[in-house]
Amino acid sequence: DVKVTQSSRYLVKRTGEKVFLECVQDMDHENMFWYRQDPGLGLRLIYFSYDVKMKEKGDIPEGYSVSREKKERFSLILESASTNQTSMYLCASSLGGAQETQYFGPGTRLLVL
Amino acid sequence: EDQVTQSPEALRLQEGESSSLNCSYTVSGLRGLFWYRQDPGKGPEFLFTLYSAGEEKEKERLKATLTKKESFLHITAPKPEDSATYLCAVQAEYNTDKLIFGTGTRLQVFP
């Protein structure tokens, strides 16, 4: 079974803090993704990566950055957290090539005060 | 613009009362359509992938079907444990890196 894990289930941070969200997958997947999920807006893609040290902007990259130093690990960074970044953050991975099914982690619920 | 619309937004069923969830999509060339189940406070769990019109897939009480404009998730004789939000997503031929998600149907099944 594919397993995607996220470093925290719940986080509370203050405005202006630097926030790191980490995601690890154990199935040697090529592609990894970060989404945020908000009521009424569905899942929106922030960034994705199709290889180590590679990254691509998604639909809403502003205010975020990412890092992929190892194949199994993909980090989302909020350089200076703001209240409008309060959300559920979901990491996903996919095998790559013709196999594009994305498998999701449990999510991190982030509250920025 | 590529778009996915799910209906209804919410559905309440009595245990055993079969029904269908709809996912209509507009995309320039469909590469694949995905169904996920999401329990409150958790990440989406993969259910099915459909690739071409006429295709059907089944898993326990769930059956997904696909036409050129929409997909249905049929739930036969649902149980309370089927209560969840069901998400639909499409992948376009021109951009296979991304999935475009609908906002989901929240299903509640009462005993």
Image: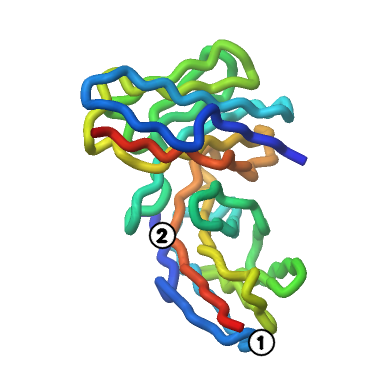
Q: Residue B11 placed where, x, y %?
A: 47, 78
Question: Which residue occupies the foreground of this view, A78 or A46?
Answer: A78
Query: Going by the image, does B21 lie left or right of A77?
Result: right
Letter of the chain that mark 1 sits on in the rendering: B
How packed is label 1: few (under 14 Cα within 10 Å), some, or many (20 or more)? some
Question: Which residue occupies the foreground of this view, B83 or A12?
Answer: A12
B33 lies above or below B13: above
Q: Residue B13 placed where, x, y %?
A: 54, 83
Residue beneath label 2, please? B103
Please tell me which residue is depicted at 56% across the width and 81% down the height of the picture: B110
Q: Which label was assigned to residue A80?
A: none
Does residue A35 show up? no
Q: Residue B94 placed where, x, y %?
A: 50, 43
Residue type, label 2: Thr
Residue beneath label 1, please? B16
Is the residue at mark 2 from the same chain as the one at mark 1?
yes
Alpha-carbon distance for marks 2 and 1? 25 Å
Letter of the chain that mark 2 sits on in the rendering: B
B48 lies above or below A34: below
